């Protein structure tokens, strides 16, 4: 199934067609997939409720498009290559036939453990091939997967399990990350103490530990698949049944479960994958993301495997055993498309060119980035040292909520400009609005990035709380999906993403809501209240800066900071650690009691001379104190 556009002219033509006749455009593409029963209608939608349905009444199972379809055509082709954390350990290579058998066998095991269509299964696993098996096995039997990044704490995992009322957790005894080993099962044990919905825990033996296993609840993966056959009838699903839930942070409250449904997500994941990366039949494609994030879902598992591609998964970290690991892997496996995050590039840049120039990197054809804006310096380093000035860089802008890449280059076919994501993919209709919701039609202007028409993989709801979905994305501007990002369109119509305009902080490409981190900090007994903002960080893009009010300003600040960091690690995970903690006697508030984050942001950014109007503050003296004590 070749869905690729092969020139810039063809892109322009397809784009125009997709805007004039979106239903016809997507119908043509969707027909190339395997449906058990064809859909009656392509699309029905409104952004008011919101209610969006694609490929209405179509019946299918995605795994038939991934496994059965490719079994016939590509049975002996590699589906998955897995590179372990330790380069001395053997890597794994599975053909589509092997993947078929493993997924079906595990699907039978899930059924045998009582999982049925519509049940939610939480997956808390390391980056090992069995993670892909677990995901697809759920889909085979119509269960909904909710993958939770294995760096989240027991507390965060329990919250996600409880919100979705998951019946099962699939995990591993432990996880290898560079020099470290992390006891995943121990975290799961702690989490599920507070999760009544969990009936079963399946544990993959990755590191050879003997974690505590609870009789009657916990079972080893190898025991669960014992005697299970390698054929499992795919469950017939509706196009709009839930495929998965993935939790992500917003500006308010706890992380929300973004819901993607089957038909539309399938079509868009494959279409965007093939076009952005210009994948060709014999290519080896590698995305370094973790499956715990949307990038791993769409562009390690679904997009590539739906396209019959060879997708690579890496268990480790970019700096182990040395900062040349990514490039060593590219040469070792002959990687053709390489997709990573700006934060990884910046981190490797800091280790110097020596680690990259010794590798040939001959096989590379397309480089990609995702997760945050890429600064020009990192862009150039990537282009020159990794791509050897011959590989286009596709800067892919998208979100958990969009399901797939929205604005990006298409391999070498579209013009590229450092720090610019570029043009929207066919079928994507971005607009820039001003604060009042008026469309900014001229080029060369900045505005709030919105979408005025649905695309197949748009989120359908936030799990268990449709009102929240409506409020967050569809209420800011009438009849528009609001992304939360600000963007600028240049004279040629290319988009440059500026960053979040809401209270979301992007740390190393990971999203956190300020409210969520504040809540974690406030759960420390000594803390009265806190305010969290982002500030520019050389490697991480943004770092977390917390202003904390305690009963008294602590005498031993270092140990008080340590305690607060520990609380955040327990509540959310290491990835949300505040970089800077400033103890203050009060927070700057308006007379109506609202924290003036604008001021705190400026101070954290090191620009205390640009605070703007502070006259509406309840107590302007506080600002002086905060500026003086800034870190
Ligand atoms: C895929 C993913 C989404 C937010 C998004 C934006 C930022 C992502 C970007 C980018 C500039 C890019 N973002 N890609 N900013 N250029 N190429 O990252 O999803 O974790 O939901 O984050 O990330 O701010 O709104 P998610």
Image: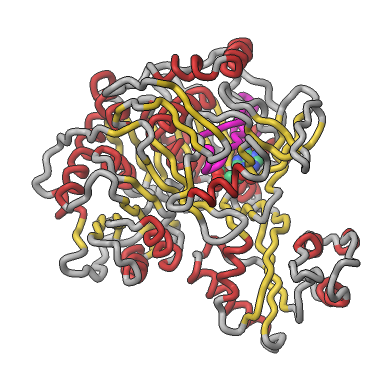
Which segment is the magenta one? 384-408
Q: Nearest the camera: 100 or 26?
A: 26
- Decide if residue 105 is on the left or right side of residue 207: left
Can you name the residue that lies furthest to the left here?
227
- Residue 201 % position (x, y): 25, 60
Q: Name above or below for residue 19 compared with residue 455.
A: above
Is residue 389 shown in magenta?
yes
Query: Residue at (33%, 61%) from the top-left corner?
Result: 174
Q: Residue 483: x, y in percent?
A: 63, 41
- Viewport quadrant of the C terminus: bottom right
Return the residue nearer the eye: 611 or 326.
611
Secondary structure mostly seen in the magenta stretch = loop
Q: Is residue 574 left or right of residue 392?
A: left
Instruction: Relative to 550, say whether 54 is above or below.
Output: above
Q: Quadrant of the N terminus?
A: top left
Nearest the camera: 170 or 619? 619
In the image, residue 158 lies in the stretch drawn in magenta: no
Asked whether the viewer can see residue 321, the reply is: no
Q: Is residue 120 above or below residue 264?
A: below
Q: Residue at x 65, y 66 (%)?
A: 579
Q: Residue at x 76, y 22 (%)?
A: 492
Residue 513 appearing in the image: yes
């Amino acid at each position: 199934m070749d869905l690729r556009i092969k020139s810039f002219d063809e892109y322009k033509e397809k784009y125009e067609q997709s805007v004039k006749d979106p239903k016809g455009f997507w119908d043509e593409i969707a027909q190339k997939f395997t449906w058990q029963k064809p859909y009656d209608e392509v699309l029905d939608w409104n952004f008011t409720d919101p209610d969006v349905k694609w490929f209405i009444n179509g019946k299918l199972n995605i795994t038939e498009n991934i496994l059965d379809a490719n079994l016939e055509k590509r049975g002996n082709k590699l589906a998955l290559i897995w590179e372990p954390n330790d380069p001395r350990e053997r890597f794994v290579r599975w053909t589509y036939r092997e993947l078929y058998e493993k997924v079906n066998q595990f699907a039978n095991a899930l059924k045998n453990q009582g999982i049925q269509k519509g049940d939610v299964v939480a997956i808390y696993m390391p980056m090992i091939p069995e993670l892909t098996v677990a995901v697809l096995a759920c889909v085979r039997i119509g269960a909904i997967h909710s993958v939770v990044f294995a760096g989240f704490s027991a507390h965060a995992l329990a919250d996600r399990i409880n919100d979705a009322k998951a019946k099962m957790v699939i995990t591993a005894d432990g996880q290898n990350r560079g020099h470290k080993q992390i006891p995943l099962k121990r975290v799961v044990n702690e989490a599920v103490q507070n999760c009544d919905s969990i009936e079963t825990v399946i544990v993959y033996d990755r590191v050879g530990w003997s974690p505590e296993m609870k009789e009657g609840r916990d079972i080893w993966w190898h025991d669960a698949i014992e005697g299970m056959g390698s054929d499992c009838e795919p469950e017939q699903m509706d196009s709009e049944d839930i495929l998965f839930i993935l939790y992500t942070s917003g500006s308010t409250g706890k992380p929300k479960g973004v819901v993607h449904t089957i038909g539309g997500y399938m079509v868009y994941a494959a279409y965007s994958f093939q076009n952005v990366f210009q994948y060709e039949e014999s290519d080896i494609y590698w995305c370094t993301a973790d499956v715990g994030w949307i990038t791993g879902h769409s562009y390690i598992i679904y997009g590539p495997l739906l396209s019959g591609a060879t997708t690579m998964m890496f268990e480790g970290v970019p700096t182990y055993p040395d900062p040349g690991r990514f490039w060593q892997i590219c040469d070792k496996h002959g990687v053709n498309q390489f997709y990573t995050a700006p934060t990884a590039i910046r981190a490797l840049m800091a280790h110097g060119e020596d680690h990259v120039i010794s590798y040939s990197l001959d096989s590379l054809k397309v480089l990609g980035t995702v997760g945050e804006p890429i600064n020009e310096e990192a862009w150039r380093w990537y282009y020159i040292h990794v791509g050897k000035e011959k590989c286009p860089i596709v800067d892919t802008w998208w979100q958990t909520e969009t399901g797939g890449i929205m604005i990006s280059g298409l391999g070498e076919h579209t013009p590229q400009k450092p720090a610019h994501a570029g043009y929207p993919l066919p079928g994507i209709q971005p607009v820039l609005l001003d604060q009042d919701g008026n469309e900014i039609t001229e080029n060369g202007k900045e505005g709030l990035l919105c979408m005025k028409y649905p695309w197949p993989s748009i989120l359908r709801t936030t799990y268990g709380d449709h009102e929240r979905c409506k409020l967050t994305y569809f209420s800011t501007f009438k009849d528009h999906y609001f992304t939360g990002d600000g963007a600028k369109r240049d004279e040629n119509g290319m988009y440059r993403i500026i960053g979040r305009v809401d209270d979301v902080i992007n740390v190393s490409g990971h999203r956190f809501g300020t409210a969520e981190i504040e809540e974690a900090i406030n759960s420390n007994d000594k803390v009265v209240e806190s305010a969290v903002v982002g500030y520019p960080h050389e490697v991480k893009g943004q770092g977390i800066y917390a202003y904390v009010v305690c009963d008294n300003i602590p005498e031993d600040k270092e140990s008080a900071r340590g305690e607060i960091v520990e609380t955040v690690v327990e509540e959310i995970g290491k990835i949300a650690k505040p970089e800077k903690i400033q103890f203050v006697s009060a927070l700057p508030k308006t007379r109506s009691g609202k924290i003036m984050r604008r001021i705190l942001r400026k101070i954290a950014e090191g620009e205390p001379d640009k605070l703007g109007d502070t006259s509406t503050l309840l107590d302007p003296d506080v600002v002086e104190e905060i500026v003086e004590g800034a870190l």
